[in-house]
Amino acid sequence: RILKNYQEKYLFQVKENHLPVDKVVIDDRLAGLVFARTMVKGDRLTVLPGSTTRIHSPLVISSIGSIPEPLPNISARGDFLAIRNADTGEVEGHDSVFALGNAVTGRGNIKESQTHGRQVSEKIIRDFLEWENPDSEGYDLHEAKETSKRIRNISDQIEKKRPLPAEKIHSIIQHIRAWQQRAGYDGDYSAWITKHRPVRLEEMLQNSDIRL
C-alpha cells in the first residue's frame, strides 16, 4: 500500500526481481543498465539464464548497499556471513570475532544497520568485556570501584591473549595495502576524497539548461 501511494504521488514504476548485471555506455557516457531477471529460492537469489534486458535512460540513480566479499576462514551462508547469534553478531567458528550491519541483517538499510551495530557493540561491552555504563543514574563510589575492577579484568583478558605472530601481522598489513591499492588510495585521505568526489547535482545543473 505504501509503495502504491508513492507510485501514484511521484509517478514511477517498479520492476520486481531485476538485478543490474552490466552497464550501457554510449559515447563514453553511462546511458542505461542491463538487468537480469531473478527468482528467490529460500534465502538465496537465483539469476534466470538468458533473461537480460537493456534499459536505456539519461539518468541512473543508484542506492548504495553492500554484501560482504568472501573472506578466508570465515564461513558464509549465501551472500551473508555465517552468524552463530544475530543478536550478538558472533561469527561461527570464532570466539572473539563479531559482525554487524548488512553482513548480518541483509536489509541494506542504513538506519537498521546503525541500530544493529549499536546493539552488538553494547552486548560486547556488557557481556564480553563485562563493562557497565558509568554515566548511568545512581553511579556512586562503590560502582566506581567495581568499574576499576572490571577494567583490570579486561586488561587481564587482553594480556592473556597471545600476540599474533609477526608473519600474520605482516600478512594483514599486506592485505590492507592491497585493498587500498584496488581503490586507488595512496595514504592521503583528503587528496583521495577530492579526486574521487562525484559530480554534484548543482554542478550538473550549472552545465545544463535546467534552472531551479
Image (cartoon, grey):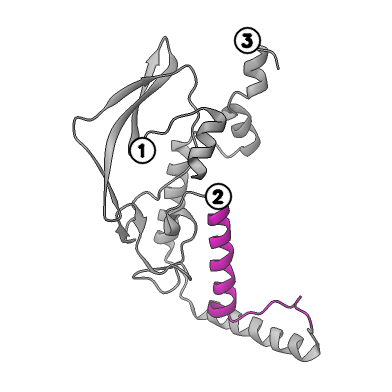
Considering the whole magenta stretch, tell me its main secondary structure.
helix
In the image, 204 versus 194, the foreground residue is 204
Q: Nearer the viewer, mark 1 or mark 3?
A: 1
In the image, 134 versus 44, the foreground residue is 44
Is residue 46 among what the camera can see?
Answer: yes
- What's the CA distance linking mark 1 and mark 3? 33 Å
The kind of residue on which mark 1 rests is Glu
Per the image, the residue denoted by label 2 is 110
Residue 25 in the image: x percent, y percent? 39, 16
The kind of residue on which mark 2 rests is Ile
In this rendering, the answer to whether 198 lies above or below 3 is: above
Q: Residue furthest bottom?
A: 142
The answer to which quarter of the image holds residue 148 is bottom right
Residue 106 in the image: x percent, y percent? 42, 54
Residue 33 in the image: x percent, y percent? 38, 24
In the image, 97 versus 101, the foreground residue is 101
- What's the CA distance linking mark 1 and mark 2? 22 Å
In this rendering, the answer to whether 93 lies above or below 43 is: below
**Part of the protein shown in magenta:** 110-137
Residue at disc 2, secondary structure: helix
Per the image, the residue denoted by label 3 is 208
Q: Nearer the viewer, mark 1 or mark 2?
A: 1
Which part of the image, by quadrant, shows the C terminus?
A: top right
Is residue 185 among what the camera can see?
Answer: no
Residue 72 in the image: x percent, y percent? 32, 56
- What's the CA distance linking mark 2 and mark 3? 32 Å
Left or right? Give the position of 188 relative to 19: right
Residue at disc 1, secondary structure: loop
Which residue is located at x 42 percent, y 33 percent?
Answer: 14
Mark drawn on residue 16: 1
